[in-house]
Structure formats: C-alpha cells, structure tokens
Image: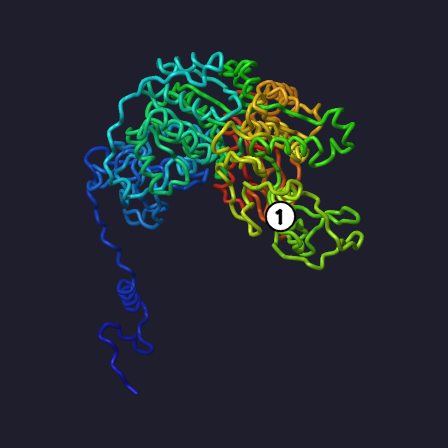
C-alpha cells in the first residue's frame, strides 16, 4: 500500500542514504515547528508618580512577615493609595522578561515609593479592591507592635484589626462629626475619693491612668459612660472594651442616655457583618469618636484617642483564640503608651496585672472608701461555729441549712440568685458502689447524663451506654459525681415548691443544650440558677434579695495559677448584683471561711487580694512580675525551636514536660495535641524589660523552621493564660 506524505512533514531519508547534516537540518526544522512560541511581552505603562507600591500580603506565615514591592500601573495611579485593599499575584517568577505564575491573594498598600530595592522585575498590582483607606498608619503601627509583642505575624494581627469588606456600606456618605458635648457631672464617681478629679483631668485634656475597683450595684455602666463623656468633652476619642455583648449593651445604653444618639458606636458580633462594618467605617472616617464593643474593638481606628477603657480584664473572653492570641488589656495598654492616652482598667475584681500597674506607679488606684463599700455591699455569710453546732454538714453539704434558711427568707423580698460552676444536668458520673469515674467503653471519655432517667452518654463521642457497668467492681448503678445547673434547678424546685425556677447559661435551654443566657429577670420572688458569667440582672428594684454561691471548692481546686483570682472574680460579679445589706441583701458562700478568696469577699477588698497575689507571684517569679512564653509541640520540634532561638542571657527554660494526651474521639482543644500525638511544652521566662527580646528570638527561630519546611513545627504562645 502506498500513500502520500503530508506536505507539512519532511520526507524520510532514503534507505541507506546520508543521515548526517541533512537529517540534522530536518530535525531542527521539526523542533522549530513543534516548540511553543513565547508569548509577546505586553508592556503596561506604569504610574508617573511613585510607581512602586509596598504591599502587606495576606499571608499569615511568620517567615513571610515582610512587605513586598509591586509595580503600580498607570490606570491605578489615583486609586492604589496607602491603606487601601488590593489584589496581587503572589509567588510569581520571572520568565522571558515578565512575571508569571503565582496565585492571586489580597493585601494592603502600605506606602508608595519612587523606586524599589528589589533587583528583578516587579509584578504589577492585579486590582484595587476598594479605594477606602482602611489601614491607616497609626493602626498599622499598632498592629506591628502587637505582632512583635506576641511573636506573631503582622498579617494575622491586621486580620483581627480590619473587618471584612462590605461594598454597600462603603458607598454610603459619612455623616459629619457632632460637636463636643459639655463635661458631665461626677454622678456616681462622687463615691470615690479620687473620682471627680479623674473626670476633671480627662475633660481638661489630661491623660490620667487608673485601676478602678467598682462598687457593687448597678451603677458601673453609668460611671463608665461618664468617664467616656468627660474625655469626649476634650475633643478626643474613646475606646471601651467589655468582655461580652451583654455588658457592652449596658455601657452603650448608659452612654446614649448621657449624651444622646449618634455620638458613639457599638461594635459587637450581634450587629451582623454589614452593620458592624458600617459602624467601623464611621469611626475610621472620623464621624464618630467613641467606640464601645467587645474584644475586636481594641483595634477600633478612633482618631486621637484620649482614653482607653477595659472592663473586667480578668475575664477569659478578652483573650483572642486566633493567632497570635493578643489580650485586649495588653493591646489597650500598648495603644495608650504609644498615643499618650489615659487608661481606665476597671471591674468589681482586680487582677494581679492591675495590681502590678499600681505597684509600679504607672497607674493610680481608683477605689471607694470603706464607708461607701459598707453602704453598697451585701452581707457575706459563711458557715461558722454556730452553724456547725446545728448542722453537722455545714462545711460539707452542697446546700447547708444556713443557705437554705437565707434563701427561704429572701424569697419573701425578691428573687434569689444561685451560682453553679458546672453546666448541663449531671456532667460527670461515677460508680455508685466503688466511686470509680464512669468512662465510655469506646473512647474512654467521661460519661454524663443530659436528662433525668436517661442512659449515660459519652461527652466525647456521644454514644449512649444503657448497659454500662463498672469495669473495676462490676456495679451497674451510676451516681452523680458532679451536678450541673439544670440538676440544681430541679433539686431547688423540689426544695422550694411553688417558687418559679429559671436557669441562665450556655446549655441550659433544655436537654439538647443550646444557649439559654438570660439578660434580665423580673424583680419578683423566684430562684435564678446560673453559671458564672451568665447571671442576669433584675429588671427593676435594688437587685437580688440573696445569692447562693454553690460548689466553691470546684472553682478553688482547679489547677492553675489563677484559680483563686478567677474564683473571687466570679463571686464578686455575682455578689455585685445583690442589694445592699441595709436592704436585706445577703450572699452565702458555703466554703471554709479562712481561705484567702473567701476573706477578700467578706471584706470586699479585691485590690488587697490582688496585691497579696502579686507578692506571692513575685516571690516565685511568675507573671506579671516576669514575662513568659509557652513552646509546645512534638518533642523534637520543641527542642529544635529552643536550640535555634537566640534567647537573652537572663532567660530561663522551665521543662519541657509532657502534655496530657488527647484520647481518641475527644474534641481537640486549641493548642492541644491531636488524638494519638505526643506533645511536650516548655516555658521560657525572662525578667521585666526583656519580653521583647524573648519574643523576637522565638519568632526568628520559628521563622527559620518554617523557611526550612520542617515537617513538625512547634507552637509559640507569649503570655499564656494557663501555665500550670
């Protein structure tokens, strides 16, 4: 069979013919036809003025924590200004005189330059996402300081500081800023010897710094609002951060009542993304000079801040779960130090960090005199010798006779608050015969009961075990090892028949869990059973007639450096909702009265307790007297990171110690090993003034490990909340 060759293909050489130069020329021609032709280089005209944009790329990796230069096309010369959001091609390579490859990522223009120190060709900006300058220089400097303090990356901090863009909110015109309002009257601050002078200093343009231990009762939102209004009267801005949306709403209402609407904004997650971004833009554009909000409001771009406020700084909600885990108190203190603003660190309790500020003279104590405390505080009762004589279980019973009798008498006057540390119904079970903790046969998780007469259910894997039996003794009956808020409400309902019982707290809405946090309850006789932090206030009247603080040993016996401090903070927050002693208000703490937190509650002396805690920590070298960082991860990763860190000579390395393993099926907590992994944790401790050097050394070592693409990388957390 014969055929015709394609006219586009060269003819094969004749058999036995020459295969030398002629064949090579034919092969070269074939290669030219099949090789890909280079694309023509399209030259985009660049901006005539400052054609280089320095960009912060949204890549939260420590080893990429630097700025990258991009070319500014002429079409973006008027829009790619410092602070705006852009999209760039990251990871591109230079091929044939042009930048190719990479992928599109978001970023922020930091500055515009006339030329770049990068020797190669710059990739152009892909797009300007918005012309709104959301990353102003002062906010960028604050984010940089926070990233350096916590050994994190700037991009991660900027993600916390700048909310996601909502285009519709940006198209709205900002209202003009209102004129300054006159300075308010002292109001409740008259009960504090230094209170009126503090407000006068703020109104005159001063920057006083104070640690405020607030009196019990409902007056703290108005006092916080008056401090903010005094600063606004001087023409400066205010940032107030509160631990949760309920507290922020109370402060928001108080400031609105004092100054009227449209003079401040409320920044909380409850507003929704678009409304929150609209309010944030009003602050960024200068239309509003005061912000009240939860944790993220610590970065609110208030112009010329004159006062930063942190309420209840010991609450765990002030610490961010996202890297690099900044704490609102520390961010606000950094902000005040950099801008020269005043500081108001307040709460019913006082942390060791607050006592440290007073001890060093950086802040002044803003405390009431003892007469004001006696007039506002409820009567605190603990089981004493007289109660023990009539009740053998006065110190061991969950609800001793003293508590039952005071609750019975108080119900004639109004509602009674019952604080219970544990959520759920029966959160922990044990064998009724040998008291061995009940565990799931499948994953070894703790067994609990969600509803009465229900089979034990695993708290990790969720499996029900109706035929459970104790592997130690063979017993088939389980008893409550711990009692939750819903079981407590059931027991109190039987003890006080005919009295309404309400519950407040996460997971109290019913058998299926849910969020049943109440904001307020009527001022009528009722039992209100609540978990710590979820206590509702009374709608009207002077407050609760009594409060029962149950299971105090559960709080005090928790492992950790802050167990006593946290217990007292929760007790004071609940007791502050009770009416004064002269109106019959009583708080019962069925715990050994000689314990230090109990004595501080009886005397209502939170600052004295914090000063003694600070002295104990100073003797042991624990924070806040020292600075600490936790390095956790697989043992070899921890060792490599610490060996590669150029720590200051004063640094001490404590450990490493093995972390408790996460059993199979158990939920993984932030910073904990995955099920089946073995982790260790080492603590790095340095004296005051060397924290920045420690963070810088750990950050550099972590960046080196990431740059080398090591398989296992240890985690670094500066100022960990729990070090025990």
Q: Is residue 125 visible?
A: no
Left or right of 88 in this view: 249? right
- Residue 494 appears in which quarter of the rendering? top right
Left or right of 382 in this view: 109? left
Q: Is residue 99 visible?
A: yes
User: Is 510 above or below relative to 354?
Assistant: below
Q: Percent from the top left, x then y, of residue 10?
A: 26, 72
Q: Percent from the top left, x then y, of residue 395?
A: 74, 31
**Going 48% across and 41% down the picture, which residue do you hit?**
707
User: Is 639 above or below relative to 647?
Assistant: below
**Going 54% across and 29% down the picture, which residue do you hit?**
577
Q: Indicate the quadrant containing the N terminus: top left, top right, bottom left or bottom right.
A: bottom left
- Residue 240 appears in which quarter of the rendering? top left
Left or right of 196 in this view: 669? right
Q: Indicate the quadrant containing the C terminus: top left, top right, bottom left or bottom right.
A: top right
Q: Residue furthest bottom?
A: 1
> In the depicted view, which residue is nearer to us: 622 or 169?
169
Residue hosting label 1: 677
User: Is 181 above or below relative to 243?
Assistant: above
Left or right of 661 in this view: 199? left
Q: Percent from the top left, x then y, of residue 17?
A: 31, 75
Count of number-bearing discs: 1
**Coloring basis for residues:** rainbow
- Residue 669 appears in which quarter of the rendering? top right
Q: Percent from the top left, x then y, of residue 46?
A: 21, 40
Q: Residues within 10 Å of mark 1 (few under 14, many from 20)?
A: few
Q: Secondary structure at mark 1?
A: loop
């Amino acid at each position: 069979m014969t055929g015709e060759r394609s006219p586009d293909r060269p003819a094969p050489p004749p058999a036995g013919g020459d295969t030398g130069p002629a064949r090579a020329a034919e092969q070269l021609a074939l290669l030219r036809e099949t090789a890909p032709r280079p694309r023509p280089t399209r030259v985009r005209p660049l901006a005539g003025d400052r054609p280089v944009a320095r960009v912060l790329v949204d890549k939260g990796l420590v080893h990429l924590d630097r700025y990258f230069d991009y070319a500014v096309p002429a079409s973006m010369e008027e829009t790619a200004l410092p602070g705006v959001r852009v999209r760039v091609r990251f990871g591109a390579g230079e091929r044939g005189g042009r930048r190719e490859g990479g992928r599109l990522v978001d970023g922020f223009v930091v500055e515009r330059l006339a030329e770049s120190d990068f020797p190669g060709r710059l990739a152009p900006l892909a797009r300007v996402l918005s012309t709104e300058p959301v990353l102003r220089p002062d906010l960028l400097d604050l984010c940089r300081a926070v990233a350096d303090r916590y050994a994190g990356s700037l991009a991660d901090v900027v993600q916390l500081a700048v909310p996601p863009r909502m285009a519709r909110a940006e198209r709205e015109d900002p209202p003009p800023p209102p004129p300054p309002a006159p300075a308010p009257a002292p109001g409740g601050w008259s009960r504090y010897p230094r209170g009126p002078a503090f407000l006068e200093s703020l109104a005159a343009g001063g920057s006083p710094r104070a640690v405020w231990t607030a009196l019990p009762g409902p007056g703290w939102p108005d006092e916080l609002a008056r401090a903010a209004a005094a600063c606004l009267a001087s023409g400066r801005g205010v940032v107030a951060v509160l631990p949760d949306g309920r507290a922020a709403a109370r402060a928001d209402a108080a400031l609105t009542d004092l100054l009227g609407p449209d003079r401040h904004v409320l920044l909380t997650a409850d507003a929704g993304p678009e409304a929150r971004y609209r309010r944030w833009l009003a602050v960024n554009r200068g239309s509003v000079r005061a912000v009240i909000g939860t944790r993220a409001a610590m970065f609110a771009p208030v112009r010329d801040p004159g006062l930063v406020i942190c309420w209840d700084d010991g609450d765990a909600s002030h610490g961010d779960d996202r890297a690099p885990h900044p704490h609102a108190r520390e961010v606000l203190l950094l902000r005040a130090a950099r801008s020269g603003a005043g500081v108001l660190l307040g709460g019913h309790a006082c942390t060791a960090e607050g006592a440290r500020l007073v001890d060093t003279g950086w802040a002044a104590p803003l405390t009431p005199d003892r007469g004001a405390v006696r007039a506002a505080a409820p009567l605190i009762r603990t089981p004493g010798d007289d109660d023990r004589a009539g009740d053998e279980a006065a110190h061991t019973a969950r609800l001793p006779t003293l508590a039952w009798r005071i609750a019975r008498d108080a119900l004639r006057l109004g509602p009674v608050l019952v604080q219970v540390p544990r959520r759920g119904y029966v959160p922990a079970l044990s064998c009724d015969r040998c008291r061995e903790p009940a565990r799931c046969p499948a994953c070894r998780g703790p067994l609990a009961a969600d509803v009465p007469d229900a089979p034990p259910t695993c708290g990790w894997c969720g499996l029900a075990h109706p035929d459970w039996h104790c592997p130690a003794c063979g017993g088939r009956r389980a008893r409550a090892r711990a009692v939750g808020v819903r079981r407590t409400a059931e027991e109190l309902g039987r003890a006080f028949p005919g009295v309404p019982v309400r519950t407040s707290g996460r997971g109290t809405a019913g058998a299926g869990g849910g969020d049943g946090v109440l904001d307020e309850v009527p001022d009528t006789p009722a039992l209100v059973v609540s978990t710590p932090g979820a206590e509702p206030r009374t709608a009207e009247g002077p407050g609760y007639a009594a409060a029962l603080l149950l299971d105090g040993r559960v709080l005090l016996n928790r492992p950790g450096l802050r167990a006593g401090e946290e217990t007292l903070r929760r007790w004071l927050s609940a007791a502050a909702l009770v009416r004064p002693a002269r109106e019959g208000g009583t708080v019962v703490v069925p715990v050994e009265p000689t314990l230090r937190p109990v004595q501080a509650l009886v005397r209502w002396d939170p600052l004295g307790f914090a000063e003694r805690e600070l002295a104990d920590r100073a003797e042991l070298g624990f924070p806040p007297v020292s600075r600490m960082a936790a390095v956790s991860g697989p043992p070899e990763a921890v060792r490599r990171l610490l060996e590669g860190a150029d720590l200051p000579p004063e640094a001490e390395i404590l450990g490493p110690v093995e972390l408790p393993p996460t059993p199979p099926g158990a939920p993984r907590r932030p910073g904990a090993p995955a099920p089946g992994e073995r982790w260790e944790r080492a603590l790095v401790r340095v004296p005051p003034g060397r924290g920045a050097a420690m963070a810088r050394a750990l950050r550099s070592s972590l960046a080196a490990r990431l740059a080398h693409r090591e398989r296992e990388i240890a985690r670094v957390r500066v100022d960990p909340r729990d070090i025990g």
